[in-house]
Amino acid sequence: MKAGDEKLILYTRNWCGYCTMVKRAVAQLGLTLEERNIWDDPQWQTELMQARGRATVPVLRRQSADGKSEWMGESRDIIQYLSHYRETLES
């Protein structure tokens, strides 16, 4: 997937320090992505469980135009990916 050709969705929940860390990075990078709080909608938690087998957050879902998804956990990995993603958009 190329940067800009994919939809980015961040799965989070309330009271999650790692989620807050990722959301701050998103804001600092000036990115806009869809956030899905798994406590707000049971369907979002179900999506996460079906894809990853657990409801641990934060998770970044990278969805291509053809509907294929790649799922990324670990807040530091997500932040690193988003930093690279932003650089790719600028070039």
Image: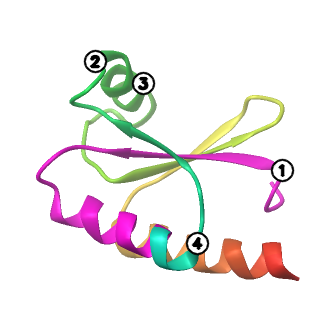
Q: Quadrant of the N terminus?
A: bottom right
In this picture, which residue range is highlighted in magenta? 1-26
Q: Mark 1 or mark 4, which is nearer the start of the sequence? A: 1
Rendered location of residue 54, percent (x, y): 27, 36
Considering only vertical position in the picture, is 43 above or below 40? above
Rendered location of residue 9, percent (x, y): 53, 44
Residue 67 occupies which quadrant of the picture? top right
Viewer-proximal residue among 29 and 88: 29
Q: Nearer the viewer, mark 3 or mark 4?
A: 4
Real-space Cα separation, disc 1 to disc 3, in angstroms: 22 Å
Residue wearing tag 3: 47
The residue type indicated by label 4 comes to: Gly
Residue wearing tag 1: 5
> Neighbour class for label 3 at 10 Å: few (<14), some, many (≥20)?
some
Real-space Cα separation, disc 4 to disc 1, in angstroms: 18 Å
Disc sitting over residue 42 in the figure:
2
Real-space Cα separation, disc 2 to disc 1, in angstroms: 28 Å
Q: Residue at the left extreme?
A: 15
Q: Mark 1 or mark 2, which is nearer the start of the sequence? A: 1
Real-space Cα separation, disc 3 to disc 4, in angstroms: 27 Å
Residue wearing tag 4: 30
Q: Nearer the viewer, mark 4 or mark 1?
A: 4
Q: Are marks 3 and 4 in contact (CB under 8 Å)?
A: no
Q: Residue at the right extreme?
A: 91
Q: Mark 3 or mark 1, which is nearer the start of the sequence? A: 1
